Amino acid sequence: MTMHHPQLAHCPHCSAEVEAASQSCRYCGKSLKQAPSKRQLKLKSDRRWAAWVMAGFFVATLVAVSLISQNH
Ligand SMILES: [Zn+2]
């Protein structure tokens, strides 16, 4: 079998054969560059962690200030 195609890739959404250089799948129309990846999920969870840490720090500061003002 000698089939010479341009560089082909499989669409991550519908798994159809599409040209690797194309920006979006010509079958389902979704972007080939924005495939759902674990890296994006990790970024989202990291942001959520940062928000929780900031909220916890804020609450801890409020509690500490109120405790200090009560002691004096
Ligand atoms: Zn597709």
Image (cartoon, rainbow, N blue to C red):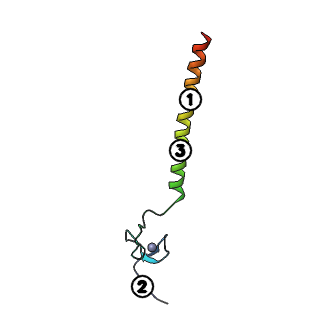
Instruction: Please tell me whether mark 2 or mark 3 is closer to you in this view.
Output: 3
Horizontal side of 20 relative to 67 (left or right) equals left
Residue that badge 2 annotates: 4
Mark 3 Cα-neighbour bin, 10 Å: few <14, some 14–19, many ≥20: few
Toward the top, the furthest residue is: 72
Task: Report the amino acid beneath label 1.
Answer: Val
Between 10 and 36, the one nearer to me in the picture: 36
Instruction: Please tell me whether mark 3 or mark 1 is closer to you in this view.
Output: 1
Q: Which mark is residue 48?
A: 3
Q: Position of residue 70 (x, y in %)?
A: 60, 14
The residue under the point 54% across, 46% down is 46
Residue that badge 1 annotates: 59
> Is there a contact, CB below 8 Å, between mark 3 and mark 1?
no
Give whichever of discs 1 and 2 has the lower sequence position.
Answer: 2
Q: Mark 2 to mark 3: distance in Å?
A: 47 Å
Instruction: Please tell me whether mark 1 or mark 2 is closer to you in this view.
Output: 1
Q: Which mark is residue 39?
A: none
Which quadrant does ligand 1 occupy? bottom left
Q: Mark 1 to mark 2: distance in Å?
A: 63 Å
Q: Position of residue 26 (x, y in %)?
A: 39, 75
Task: Report the amino acid beneath label 3.
Answer: Arg
Q: Position of residue 50 (x, y in %)?
A: 53, 40
Per the image, label 1 sits on a secondary structure element best described as: helix
Would you place residue 50 above or below residue 6 in this image? above
